[in-house]
Image (cartoon, coloured by chain):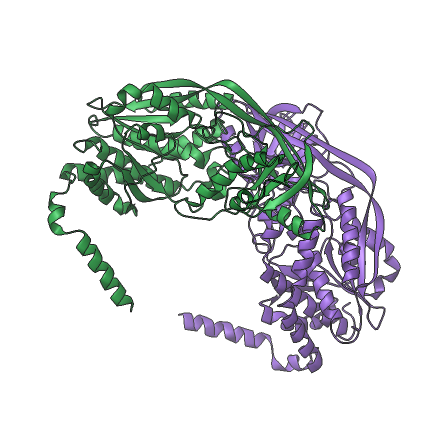
Chain colours: A purple, B green
Amino acid sequence: MIRTIFAGAFAVLHLSSPALAQENAPALTPKQTETVDRLIDAGLENDLAWEVLESLTTEVGPRLGGSAAEARARDWGVAKLKSLGFKNVRIETFEMPAWSRVSEAAEIVSPFPQPLTIAALGHSPSTPEGGIEAEVVRFRTLPELQAAPMEGLAGKIIFIDEPMARTQDGSGYRTAVAKRGLGAVEAAKRGAVAVLIRSAGTDNHRTPHTGGMVSGGASLAPRPGAALSNPDADQLARAIKRADGPVTLRLNIQTEWVQNAVSGNVIGEIPGKTDELIVIGGHLDSWDNGTGAIDDGAGIAITTAAAKLIDDLPGKPTRTIRVVMWGAEEVGIYGGKAYAEQHKDKLDKHIVAAESDFGAGEIWRFDTRFGEASQPKAKPMANALRRLAITPGTNQAFGGADIGPIMRAGVPAVTLYQSGWDYFDLHHTPDDTLDKVDPEKLRQNVAAWAAFVYMASEMEGDFR
Amino acid sequence: MIRTIFAGAFAVLHLSSPALAQENAPALTPKQTETVDRLIDAGLENDLAWEVLESLTTEVGPRLGGSAAEARARDWGVAKLKSLGFKNVRIETFEMPAWSRVSEAAEIVSPFPQPLTIAALGHSPSTPEGGIEAEVVRFRTLPELQAAPMEGLAGKIIFIDEPMARTQDGSGYRTAVAKRGLGAVEAAKRGAVAVLIRSAGTDNHRTPHTGGMVSGGASLAPRPGAALSNPDADQLARAIKRADGPVTLRLNIQTEWVQNAVSGNVIGEIPGKTDELIVIGGHLDSWDNGTGAIDDGAGIAITTAAAKLIDDLPGKPTRTIRVVMWGAEEVGIYGGKAYAEQHKDKLDKHIVAAESDFGAGEIWRFDTRFGEASQPKAKPMANALRRLAITPGTNQAFGGADIGPIMRAGVPAVTLYQSGWDYFDLHHTPDDTLDKVDPEKLRQNVAAWAAFVYMASEMEGDFR
């Protein structure tokens, strides 16, 4: 039985890749193939990414978009890129409204008095100074709340208890983000005073997951909002089930909102023989509760180390490799938007862009978003990555939040897709710290990125 | 080679248990053997322990010794024991000095400004109101600090970075407790202003482990003290390594200390045919940061459920089964001491005592502390537990903190030794919550306890 199944599978594979079509497909030159292999070998022994990541997370630590800590991170970025020999190192600043956390506290007042662990969500307005006390009403999912009648929730605290699916590709996060963003909107429609959500996360630690409530981030959310850690959401659900009558909570969230804060993108380059650009990077800001090791110090470290490996090759690359440490991503993708505006006249020189912003897990898939005509070029790239246990993916690459604005302006992109299996155990929590990063997986990332960047720089023609 | 080793091992086993001695050894009657098996079967299907544990951790939650929450826990205990049909249900109160946490904060001031996550340790005095700012000096271990010269640490904050060994039998905790207790003593001797320790714990989460600094607990520690979570201890060690000069911290710990707080032991009984007693239980109080599921709600739940299984047997047990929910253990073993004093005239009626206070892991070993003459009685008990994957242990049973005072007064004891492998990932942290308990392991515990209690009640003669 097993033999039969395997024979069938092989047959399908052979039929789907006819030898004739292969002969005309784009391919790397023997010299390019050799260099890709050399870069992968070097990446798999690379310690620079770890060093960069340790340096950033230790010397700067948490670095919320628009904060003084993020400004220190920019200074760190400039110094680091210069010390590594990058050229044209600079900060491109922009203004943004900045949200920050002052304090947060929640407790069950009755019938089972006890504290609950919460994290205020980004863009949450403050409650009145002494907090609010109100009955809590539980909804198992966001759609359940959305389907609820408009009456009966005035003055209440809404609790959306929807759990999050663990997935390799991170698709569970889409529904989780909806709960985080839309809860306050639904609460406001119904006159509820605040919204609590079960953390958008897959762990069972008392480390609640923060994150933005407002997509785009230009204003505060219509109601105060906070995330309970998963064990606290369990606890509140049990308390509601065990109580004979209403469960009353006290919630005190204090936040600040400044209209004209300053942030910036840190840029450094490995100059090429032409003014065509390969843009790679990660975001420099982090949430305020962890040290931003996996989100997104890892992305900064991986792309910086990969570019450095290109610089270490003899001679200049054909295209310029531009590393961008994007500013203020978490709180509204301000860096990505500012870059697209500041560089709008030169986007035709942007050959391809990619962002590393999905943790520090191993890369398992290579996706592209190339023009129809350029799609065959994905194949030799994907093939070169297969020795790293990376499987060819789709032409629907997400790319990354920060390169979204230039992608929408026509810049091709790729995704070196990292495993999201453990990512949402740590994402946006105090637990996003250096000890969670596996140096060996970091090296696999550097190897794949160096190989990709080299191929993108050296392959003939563009990807539009 | 393997065969030879095994043959040797079997030979040793046979030699050490000669058939002749076996014939005269104490044994269970066939009826007792049958009842033990029935109790184990019932325990392995028992849901009562889970129900008790869910009820306590949900309806009361955290319950620090001497607090209003602990008083609510006592009311809960009385109601729960009565509802289960226990007799002579009562609270035996006592007075105690009570420590409590008000607030705690730590940050690196220079050269890498950022917050650190800490938990004030039990019995820590407060820092001055605005906190203290001082250079930190790192010691890799407690002995390294103890060996340090008396000069040079005045005005400094001492950081003991000693990690803790993961062990099945919990032996790694002994050194960890020394670090937690003696750090402040060493700091005081040298004129240091405070002590920070790496958490006495084996996890890598941002959930620092609290715990008492003063053995016996009758006074405050000589210096403020707090535990850094393990990732924060890593971070501080890295910061010290990366800094060119001194690393300065700001530390603000505010606590309260009340001399005449009230606590109490909650007691319930399954009356026997005689006034001889089997005393079992766990401690009712918990630290203030978690909901005390593994420490020690599980012990309360397991021993209550085991006693209830004895009550469900036809007829009365020979001896009275007394369940004690000990008060104020964590903060100074006040319940155990008060009981020994309050019952000092009846300790000769205490046949054997045991406490469940090492989490909710599976029981893997059966230890006794019997008199020389009674030692052979351990064997049939241990044999009856072997079907639960419990191995016969030593006659050096620790017993438990709360039964320590009556053990020292001559009461025999046993330890149903739980695995400590994961225990110190959660112990004394916010993460000590219900979701960490495995219901199947809880059932194995109940089965073993019911079997032990029955045998202790029915076997002829005492264990002195």
> How many marks are shown on the rendered structure?
0
Q: How far from the left and from the top, in percent, is residue A185? A: 70, 35
Q: Residue at x 76, y 42 (%)?
A: A217
Q: How far from the left and from the top, in percent, is residue B176? A: 48, 42
* Residue A397 appears in the rendering: no
Q: Residue at x 35, y 20 (%)?
A: B341
Q: Residue at x 34, y 32 (%)?
A: B303
Q: Residue at x 44, y 26 (%)?
A: B328
Quick one: A105 or A371, which is closer to the camera?
A105
Q: Quadrant of the C terminus of chain B?
A: top left
| Up/down of B384 relative to B81, above or below | below
Quick one: B386 or B109, which is closer to the camera?
B109
Q: Quadrant of the N terminus of chain B?
A: bottom left
Seen as rendered, the residue at the extreme right is A345
* Residue A295 appears in the rendering: yes
Q: Is residue B93 toward the left or the right of residue A220 in the image?
A: left
| Up/down of B201 relative to B215, above or below | below
Quick one: B244 or A340, which is closer to the camera?
B244
| Up/down of A209 relative to A423, above or below | above
Q: How far from the left and from the top, in percent, is residue A312? A: 74, 71
